[in-house]
Image: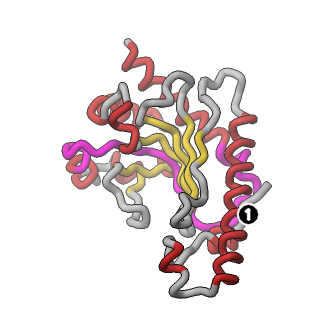
Amino acid sequence: MKLTASDFDALYLPEKQFRKLKEIYTEEEIDILKKERKRLWQEWRELVLAIYKELPVSSELAKPYIESWTNGWQMKGHFFATFRFINWEQNATCISLLWNAKYLKVGLEWQAYKAKSSLLDVSLHNHYLLPLLPEIKMVNHYSVWTSAKEEFTPFLLLSDFQAGVKKEILSELDNKNGLGVGVIFEKRDLMNPVETFLPLISELEFLYSKMKHAFEG
């Protein structure tokens, strides 16, 4: 299984809503777009499930949630999946994978759409995650962000954050946005994404586990 730079390119959409796509393309062209989108999503689903199957026996992560490629009135602009601990599926803190036309992100973050059902609120999420950042070994490979970040704005490297470039991130955390940390794979050929992502997810699970244990006391 592999992902190519051409697969990233194929994720680009000039519009997501079907009614707007009809202003640009014929019905036949839209059908071709839909088939290509579904094909890519099936590859994405296969990848996420393959990662889950290859997790170590010691992993406490539940079967991943994989968002659909459409909600009926639009095609999604990216593909998205989340891993959460067993019996922690209602919590906003998660390990997430997001793939769009520009990058593929693997991170530990806060998902605001789960805020109402989450035992761990955003303040506690930030309180438990922020002190764990120095434990990340491959610091030059990681980035940090908050839930206020727009999808295509640049990421801040964790090494820069630790070196003192903190003002914007800390301001967003003060405004009750959730901290995220992970690795960004810019558009490229990924010849074996399962092997590439597995150790990263394991490292993020280690941090995630520390957050869970701190919360549960």
The crowding category of the residue bearing disc 1, from other C-alpha atoms within 10 Å (few below 14, some 14 to 19, many at least 20), is few
Q: Secondary structure at mark 1?
A: helix
Q: Is residue 122 visible?
A: yes
- In the rendered view, tell whether residue 108 sits above or below residue 152: above
| Residue 167 at x, y percent in the picture | 22, 52
| Residue 53 at x, y percent in the picture | 74, 35
Between residue 148 and residue 132, name the one nearer to us: 148
- In the rendered view, tell whether residue 133 sits above or below residue 21: above
Determine the residue positioned at 43% across, 42% down. Answer: 109
Magenta span contains residue 92: no
58 displayed left or right of 136: right
Q: Quadrant of the C terminus?
A: top left
Determine the residue positioned at 34% across, 37% down. Answer: 115
First to last magenta residue range: 172-197
Q: Quadrant of the N terminus?
A: bottom right
Quarter of image, res 59? top right
Q: Is residue 77 visible?
A: no
Determine the residue positioned at 57% across, 50% down. Answer: 67
Q: How is the image coloured?
A: secondary structure
| Residue 151 at x, y percent in the picture | 42, 62
Between residue 10 and residue 34, name the one nearer to us: 34
Determine the residue positioned at 55% across, 42% down. Answer: 82
Quarter of image, res 181? top left
- Amino acid under disc 1: Arg
| Residue 198 at x, y percent in the picture | 67, 40
What is the number of callouts on the image?
A: 1
**Which residue position holds label 1?**
39
Magenta span contains residue 193: yes
